[in-house]
Image (cartoon, coloured by chain):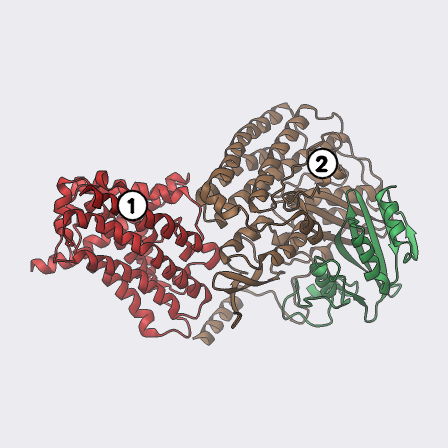
Amino acid sequence: MQAVIALLIFPGGLCVLLLGLAYEWLDRKLMAQMQNRVGPRWYQPVADLVKLLAKQETMPNGVNPLLFIGLPLVGLASVLTAALYVPLVGLAPSYSFRGDLIVTIYLLGLLTFCMSLAGSNTLDRFSLMGALRALTQLFSYEVPFLLALLGPALAAGSWQIAEISAYAETHWLILTQPLGFVVALIGLMGKLELSPFDAPEAETEIVAGALTEYSGRGLALFHLSRDVALVVGLTLVAAFYLGGMANPLWFFGKTLLLLLVVSGLQALFARLRIDQTVGLWWRYGMLLVLLQWLLMIVWR
Amino acid sequence: MTALEQAQGLLAAWAQETRTPEAGRLDVVIAPEKLVAATTALFDARWGYLAGITGLDAPKSGQIEVLYHFCAGAYVLTLRIALAREKPSIASICSVIPAASMFERELAEMFGVAVVGTPDPSRLFLPDDWQDGVYPLRKDFAEEASHAE
Amino acid sequence: MPSERFVIPIGPQHPALKEPGHFEFSVEGERVTGATVRLGYAHRGIEKACEERNWVQSLYLLERICGICSHIHTTAYCLGVERLAGVEVPPRAQAIRVLIAELERVHSHLLWLGVAAHEAGFDTLFMYSWRDRETVMDVLEGLTGNRVNYSANVLGGVKYDLDEARAETIRKGVDYLEARTYYYLELVVHDPVFVQRTRGIGTVTREQAEWLGLVGPAARASNVARDLRVESPYAAYDLFPVQMVLETAGDLEARVSVRLKELFESYRVIRTILDKLPTGEIKGRMPKKVREGETVSRVEAPRGELFYFIKSNGTDKAERVKVRTPTLCNLAPMMTLAIGHQLADMPMLLAGVDPCFSCNDRSIVVRNAQEAETRWTWEQLRRYGIEVYKCKR
């Protein structure tokens, strides 16, 4: 019974979904405030979701219907699964085993992969272009991001999220691994395709990128998946670098602080071209994270 | 020597008639087949730039007049070419001035002047399903007629 | 390896375009290998319509060619028709024309800055510059009662006069905008990410710019001295001279900074006009019929040289009004330049010349000559929609 509750209601399932919508609203509101706009009301993400779910879904000609319907489900399922392995709201993860960090990162990557596949599945040129860019971007940020999250793992001597978080409770890794923290946070922005890494969905070039042909339920699910990915990502970074598991309120504060930084960074920059994104990650992101590793090894 | 005098000198070989309609302007009437040569002369001397091509339909005299406006600072030089209203055609000057392409396309679709050798003869402004042989800026295309219920 | 042409269509409906135009970019990966343009989606047949309306009616029609540069269109038209009719326009009217034209330029350039920033994905700058644009719109509204189509020009003069109180509010608005413009200029030349998107992109050398026939800020960014306000001062620009702003780099960054630096000139001219506004009437007498003749009227619109050719046949209607807008001059060169650039640069490149499709599209009638009935009732439209939808299923 407890397992079912953990899976469906708290801390997994419903709770994560609501948290995701709340974070999305906060992100939008903060962005709006920084851009001198009013921003959406608190229930706007829910309203958007309900509207999209209620809308008729148009399936374009030439797509594989199984993939078209299945991919949003797989995407959402993968991030929801990932949510079970992270210390949501500062509580111990619902499930834990050795090496679950790798699984979590893989599951987060699966969402991007699902979106790219969904884009490639259609004949639409914007979608194809967006899918191509999303994959290109995946290959650029994924390695530095992974290495940045492995830094704490290396320090804690474990690849299990629960153990790393426990270790982080006594070691604020943002102080000992500042470079890794920066790369992890910005890597998260790349992963979530937030500005300035929003070339895969650059609206002035390729409309909505890979998701251009999606309407109705598929789009709603993909949006929801991205919100959940935001929660999972912020939780991971906060747990690893900002003092591990803590009481929910305190942990909440930490993730919100991270969200504030992320929103600020989004408002601050113009969009990078895809070649500039790749260059940035491999030239600077990679270098920074390797430098961090080098420092850690020397430190020991 | 002002720019207009210089232009007059450049075009002297082809000019059939030269007028000064107002201060700072010079109108030079040339024969249709001399257009490319005259344009080349202007271009080689770096005299101004092509500011536009105007078509003028005059059904009474049975002519379509094509005006090539060249501007240099405050001065405007106009090459005037009279074409027969039946099957008017003129050579393209895109080989000399590529920027003329848009102007030539507009002239062709609005006045039915065939621009021979223009690189892209496709429609620029008119809808794809516009009837061939209907040229909206000709005088016999009456706006009121098209609004008649 | 050109194997199959992969064409990315931009428009007629596309988030990058605020007005309908259609561009097709063939790409290999992210690299553009070809570009074509198709216009006409906002055609209203204004040139033709002018031939069937009297001189005064045409004025209001021409004002609606473009929303952003409405005043400059009527200025060009009025100056041309007044010259044909031999009407003397009082100096105060000419000064007010220039005043509104410069305010309009401020409006247009700020709007453009926002659009360019949006194309680069820099929405914060977009929001900021459009907020500040409200200031100049309010100033224009206070002066003329309208925010977009100011309707300030009439044949023979202007409609609106201004007093000292009005001048003071304009001064206040201009002071605020000047401070903001400094800030934006700093931003666009120093923000590393934005500069990455503009520096060295879409470079046009001086020779190319002359050869391709660029006009306006796009030409001045390539160090081509083309500004009719300086070269051939019309209206009151001889009384209130403008300094030409030139840049040498010829890339997108230069096009941004030319426009912003021009704003300082506009602010200066606006202040001078307010301080030294000539006294007297604001409208001369205009005859109903205009004597036979032709004239060319050229003015400097915010986007570049605006060219009017007006022919009168001695009646109360024009024989021909030809409008050549700056966008038509600037668009073709950009299509040539596009080749070899990244797809991601295309919206920026297009925005770099500040294209105005409504300006371009003006010269045909809306109706299709073949169709018997094109005015649809709501019921017909609804039925048509259902039919189309059924077929697609």
Residue C158's tag is 2
Secondary structure found at label 1: helix
Q: Position of residue A128 (x, y in %)?
A: 42, 66
Q: Quadrant of the C terminus of chain B?
A: bottom right
Callout 2 amino acid: Val
Q: Position of residue A227 (x, y in %)?
A: 28, 53
Q: Is residue C98 above or below residue A142?
A: above
Rendering colour (chain A): red
The residue closer to the viewer here, A294 or A203, is A294
The residue closer to the viewer here, B86 or B99, is B99
Specify the chain shown as green: B
Outermost residue to the right: B17
Q: Chain of mark 1?
A: A
Outermost residue to the front: A298
> Which residue carries the number 1 mark?
A291
Specify the chain shown as brown: C
Q: Position of residue A175 (x, y in %)?
A: 22, 38
Tell me whether the residue at label 1 lies in contact with that at label 2, contact meaning CB atoms closer than 8 angstroms: no
Q: Residue at x 41, y 40 (%)?
A: A35
Q: Say if residue C51 shows up in the picture.
A: no
